[in-house]
């Protein structure tokens, strides 16, 4: 046995992960246990409904979350349903949809899929080709609505997403840079229209999530979305990783910053009341919702139906 072999500090098995913040090494079993315990702690703070939806893209984060929830489902007072949105991205989404379907079969979790083509009449590829707007912006707006439609179909009032600690930290810093306090409260609290979002991986790092998926044999080498581009988030990610390297725990502190703000001000902060879209009837921030604007329904000539 090599002299430089490092062992888990909770048992005598080889370590696979170093928690730099706590300064401890963990073996594969204790890493899995650590991730699952973090999710347990988070869910104990939530009043779970009868059915919990899981936003499931088929990627590593949502796959890891679905695996954790399937492992602890006997402890939960709710059943779990995986919710997948098929945006219609040629050469990319077929592989991830297939991976999502296979994972749900392995984990024995019910799986519901909704497609842009069926809901809007167009795939994302078609919509992007007829618009000057950023593809990620279009996708984000339409995907959120599609997920809500699917949640309503399945009588789901709460959706768990796979956003991890690193994602939270990046979003917190981006919100601080933008100066938009409304974004801190977006998606939280109850609404008669929208399903509440919860994020069980808020205290689990991206590295831990990736290792969890890998150690459970669920990590897949899937293609990158062709519309993914460098952005402010990429710059913020690089900055935070450097801070975390120099100051272990910085990522966790940044991620928990907005959670602390919500805990302190959630009951006193007054969110703007929803307006009803004059075209589709869904709630939004204006008299015409973003979905209808993206689809060109706010103009006499719908740019998405013109000849290519």
Image (cartoon, helix red, strand yellow):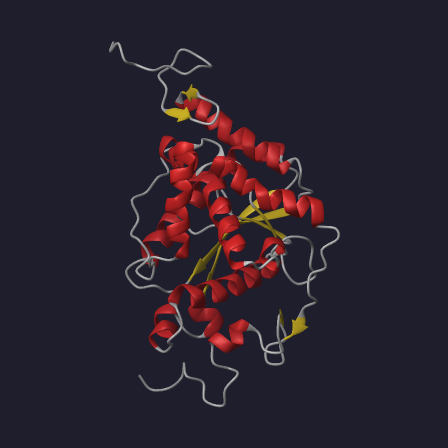
Determine the residue positioned at 42% across, 33% down: 208
Residue at the spot 33% in from the left edge and 86% down from the top edge: 307
Q: What percent of the width, then of the height, locates residue 215?
A: 37, 30
Q: Residue at x 41, y 73 (%)?
A: 122
Q: Residue furthest bottom?
A: 300
Q: Is residue 299 something that shows in the picture? A: yes
Taking 10 as reference, is 215 left or right?
left
Q: Is residue 101 above or below residue 120?
A: above
Give the residue displayed 42% in from the left and 70% down from the top. Answer: 117
Work out whether residue 200 can be spotted.
Answer: no
Q: Is residue 233 above or below residue 142?
A: above
The one nearer the camera, 227 or 180, is 180
Give the image location of residue 45, x and y in percent. Answer: 67, 38
- Outermost residue toward the right in this view: 268
Q: Position of residue 143 (x, y in %)?
A: 48, 62
Task: Residue lying at the far left in this picture: please name it.
Answer: 2
Q: Where is residue 305 in the image (x, y as percent from the top left)?
A: 40, 84
Question: Is 65 above or below relative to 225?
Answer: above
Quadrant holding the N terminus: top left
Q: State how many labels appear.
A: 0
State the residue in front, 141 or 237: 237
**Quadrant placement of the C terminus:** bottom left
Q: Splitting the image into 4 quarters, where does residue 150 fall? A: bottom right
Residue 286 is left or right of residue 55, and the answer is right
């Amino acid at each position: 046995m090599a002299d430089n072999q490092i062992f888990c500090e909770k048992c005598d098995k080889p370590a696979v992960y170093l928690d730099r913040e706590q300064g401890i090494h963990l073996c594969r079993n204790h890493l899995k246990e650590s991730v699952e315990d973090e999710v347990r702690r988070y869910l104990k703070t939530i009043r779970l409904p009868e059915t919990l939806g899981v936003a499931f893209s088929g990627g590593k984060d949502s796959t890891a979350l679905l695996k954790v929830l399937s492992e602890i489902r006997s402890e939960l007072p709710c059943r779990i349903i995986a919710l997948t949105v098929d945006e219609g991205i040629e050469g990319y989404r077929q592989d991830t949809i297939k991976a999502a379907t296979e994972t749900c079969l392995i984990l024995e979790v019910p799986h519901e899929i909704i497609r842009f083509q069926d809901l809007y009449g167009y795939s994302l590829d078609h919509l992007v080709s007829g618009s000057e707007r950023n593809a990620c912006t279009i996708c984000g707006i339409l995907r959120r609505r599609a997920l809500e439609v699917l949640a309503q179909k399945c009588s789901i009032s709460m959706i768990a997403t796979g956003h991890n600690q690193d994602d939270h930290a990046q979003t917190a810093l981006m919100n601080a840079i933008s100066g938009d306090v409304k974004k801190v409260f977006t998606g939280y609290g109850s609404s008669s229209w929208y399903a509440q979002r919860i994020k069980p991986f808020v205290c689990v790092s991206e590295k831990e999530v990736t290792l969890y998926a890998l150690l459970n044999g669920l990590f897949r080498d899937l293609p990158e979305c062709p519309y993914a581009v460098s952005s402010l988030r990429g710059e913020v990610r690089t900055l935070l990783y450097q801070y975390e390297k120099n100051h272990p725990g910085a990522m966790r502190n940044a991620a928990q910053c907005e959670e602390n703000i919500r805990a302190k001000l959630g009951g006193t902060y007054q969110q703007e009341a929803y307006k009803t879209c004059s075209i589709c009837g869904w709630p939004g921030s204006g008299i015409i919702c973003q979905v209808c604007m993206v689809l060109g329904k706010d103009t006499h000539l719908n740019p998405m139906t013109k000849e290519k």
